[in-house]
C-alpha cells in the first residue's frame, strides 16, 4: 500500500454547512474558508532603517509601521502584529519564494523569518450582516469608521485568539484562526449566524 | 474596563494579562545580597490602596509588556508617558 499525502483545509468538513448558511442567509452573510495561504512571521528591528529598506526591496512593498494596519502589493500583504513583528501573507505556492525574499532582505541582521502557514487558516466573512455577526463575539469596534480598509487587529473572538482584517471597501472580513481553534470558531460563527 | 495598550490603544481587559507590581529593583550587588535582600526582591510586593505601578501584557493582541498606573480602588488608569510605558 502506498501512503498518499492528502492536504485538507482545517475547515474542509464545514464547506457544506457554509453553503447551507449561504442558501438561507443569502447575500446578507456568507462564510468561506481560504485555506493554504502562505504565511510567514517576520521579526526585525523596525528602527533599523537600512534593514527595513532591504526588506522593502526584496519584498516589493514596505511593511506597515502604524499599529494594526496592513500593506499590500498585488497578491502579497503584510499585517502589523507588533512593533517588531509582521505576518506576511501570500498565495499558496509562494511560501518558499516569500521566505527566500524575507531572508534576503534580513541579510545578517538580527531577526527571524518563520513559515507559519500551517498555524492558521483564514475564514472570509462577507455580506452586509458580517459586521453584526462578528459583533456578537468581538470586543473591538469593527465599524468602518473605526476599522476601515487596510485595518487589521489581533483580538479575541468568543475567547479564541484571532487576527481580523478588512482588506478593502467591500463588506468583508478576513479572520485568521489557529487551526486547532478553527472548528470551534466555525461552530460558534454558524450558531451566532442563526441569531441574525 | 478598557486598558490603554501603548501600541493598540484602548482594548477590553479580557485581552490582557496582569504582571504584578512594576519597578521592582533587582539587587544592586547580587553577589553580596543576603537572604533578607533576596527575600525582599522575590517575595515582597506593594499592596497599596490607591495608585499602583503595574505590569500588563496585551496577550491576545500585540503581546507586548508595558507599564501603567492603576488606582486599586477606582480602577482609574493614569496616563503614562509613552517612553515610560513601552518598557
Image (tube, coloured by chain):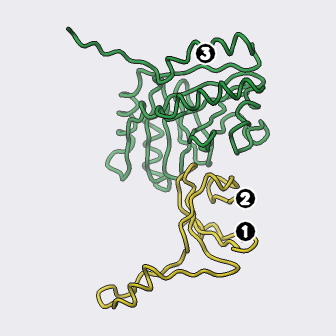
Chain colours: A green, B yellow
Q: Are marks 1 and 2 on the same chain?
A: yes
Residue A21, compared with residue B85, is above or below; it is above
Dot 2 crowding, Cα within 10 Å, few <14, some 14–19, many 20+: few
Location of residue A68 in the rendering, given as x and y in whole percent from the top left corner: 62, 45
- Looking at the rendered structure, the secondary structure element under dot 2 is loop
Contact between marks 1 and 2 (CB within 8 A): the answer is: yes
Contact between marks 1 and 3 (CB within 8 A): the answer is: no
Disc 1 versus disc 2: distance between alpha carbons? 8 Å
Residue drawn at x 68%, y 19% is A30
Which of the two discs, 1 and 3, sits closer to the camera? 3
Which of the two discs, 2 and 3, sits closer to the camera? 3
Residue drawn at x 76%, y 27% is A195
Dot 1 crowding, Cα within 10 Å, few <14, some 14–19, many 20+: some
Q: Are marks 1 and 3 on the same chain?
A: no
The residue sitting at the left extreme is: A1
The residue labelled by disc 2 is B1
The label number, if any, that marks residue A17 in the structure image: 3
Location of residue A23 in the rendering, given as x and y in whole percent from the top left corner: 70, 10
Residue drawn at x 68%, y 40% is A138
Residue placed most toward the observer, B75 or A126: B75
Residue drawn at x 61%, y 49% is A67
Residue A163, compared with residue A38, is above or below; it is below
Looking at marks 1 and 2 on the same chain, the residue that comes earlier in the sequence is marked by: 2
The residue labelled by disc 1 is B75
- Looking at the rendered structure, the secondary structure element under dot 1 is loop
Residue B34, compared with residue A6, is above or below; it is below
* Label 3 chain ID: A
Amino acid at each position: 500500500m502506498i501512503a498518499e499525502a492528502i492536504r485538507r483545509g482545517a475547515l474542509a468538513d464545514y464547506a457544506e454547512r457554509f453553503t447551507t448558511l449561504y442558501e438561507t442567509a443569502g447575500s446578507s452573510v456568507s462564510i468561506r474558508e481560504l485555506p493554504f495561504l502562505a504565511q510567514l512571521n517576520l521579526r526585525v528591528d523596525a528602527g533599523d532603517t537600512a534593514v527595513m529598506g532591504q526588506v522593502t526591496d526584496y519584498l516589493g512593498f514596505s511593511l506597515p509601521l502604524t499599529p494594526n494596519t496592513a500593506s499590500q502589493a498585488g497578491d502579497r500583504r503584510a499585517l502589523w502584529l507588533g512593533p517588531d513583528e509582521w505576518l506576511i501573507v501570500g498565495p499558496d505556492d509562494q511560501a518558499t519564494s516569500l521566505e527566500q525574499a524575507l531572508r534576503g532582505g534580513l541579510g545578517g541582521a538580527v531577526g527571524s523569518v518563520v513559515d507559519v502557514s500551517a498555524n492558521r487558516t483564514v475564514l472570509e466573512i462577507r455580506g452586509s450582516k458580517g459586521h453584526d455577526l462578528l459583533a456578537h463575539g468581538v470586543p473591538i469596534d469593527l465599524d468602518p469608521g473605526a476599522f476601515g480598509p487596510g485595518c487589521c487587529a489581533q483580538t479575541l473572538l468568543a475567547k479564541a485568539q484571532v487576527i481580523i482584517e478588512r482588506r478593502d471597501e467591500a463588506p468583508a472580513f478576513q479572520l485568521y484562526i489557529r487551526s486547532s481553534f478553527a472548528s470551534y470558531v466555525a461552530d460558534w460563527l454558524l450558531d451566532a449566524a442563526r441569531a441574525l | 474596563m478598557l486598558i490603554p495598550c501603548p501600541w493598540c490603544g484602548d482594548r477590553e481587559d479580557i485581552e490582557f494579562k496582569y504582571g504584578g507590581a512594576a519597578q521592582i529593583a533587582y539587587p544592586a550587588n547580587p553577589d553580596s545580597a543576603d537572604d533578607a535582600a533576596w527575600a525582599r526582591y522575590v517575595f515582597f510586593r506593594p499592596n497599596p490602596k490607591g495608585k499602583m505601578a503595574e505590569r500588563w501584557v496585551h496577550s491576545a493582541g500585540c503581546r507586548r509588556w508595558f507599564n501603567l498606573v492603576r488606582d486599586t480602588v477606582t480602577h482609574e488608569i493614569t496616563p503614562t508617558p509613552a517612553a515610560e510605558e513601552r518598557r
